[in-house]
Amino acid sequence: MDITIDLESPDPLYAQLIAQLKSVIERGHKKPGDPLPSIRQLANDLDLNSKTVAKAYRLLERDRLIQARGVRGTFVHPQASVENSVDIGTRVLEELTQTVDRLREIGATESEIRIGFSQVMKQTR
């Protein structure tokens, strides 16, 4: 598995790792059921903090691209080829853009929107 992290890139390291792992799966270099390196092993191989790799793995698992099987390891999810097209980050931006547009239509200021967003995020933890 050929993954390269660009330390000079403005993109966060975990985001680069996610994009590269998605690409590996998309290109068929890793197929559903194939094992992935452990968090510790991949962190060592890429000279990254294990928390960075753990965050990438957590988000990929949330998106159903990989599957943790406890002590047996982490594997490409059986539905990875179907789920690889799902991008929750893009969906969040689309939803928030629509919401902000509706709030602006009713006359809400940017400050009111920010304050409201902050309050909602505190309430939903």
Image (tube, rainbow, N blue to C red):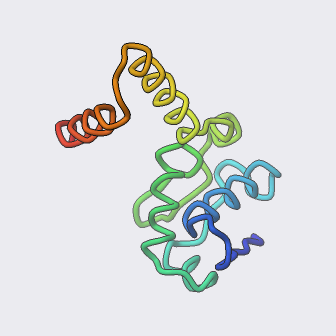
Say left or right for 69 vs 24.
left
**Image-quadrant location for residue 90:** top right
Is 70 or 50 nearer to us in this picture? 50
Where in the figure is residue 48, as x and y percent of width and height? 54, 81
Above or below, 41 against 60 in this view is: below
Q: Residue, x 49% and y 79% (percent of image)?
A: 40
Residue under the point 49% across and 35% down: 92
Residue 71 image position (x, y, % from top left)? 41, 66
Quarter of the figure that contains the N terminus: bottom right
**35, above or below 39, in the image:** above
Q: Identify the residue at image location x=77%, y=48%.
A: 26
Q: Residue furthest top?
A: 106
Viewer-proximal residue, 10 or 125? 10
Q: Quadrant of the C terminus?
A: top left
Q: Residue at x 67, y 41 (%)?
A: 84
The percent coordinates of residue 121 (x first, y second) are 26, 40
Name the spot of residue 46 as percent of width and height, x first.
63, 81
- Give the quarter of the image for residue 44: bottom right
Nearer to the camera, 55 or 7: 7
Reply above or below: 37 against 75: below
**Number of numbered discs visible in the structure rendering:** 0
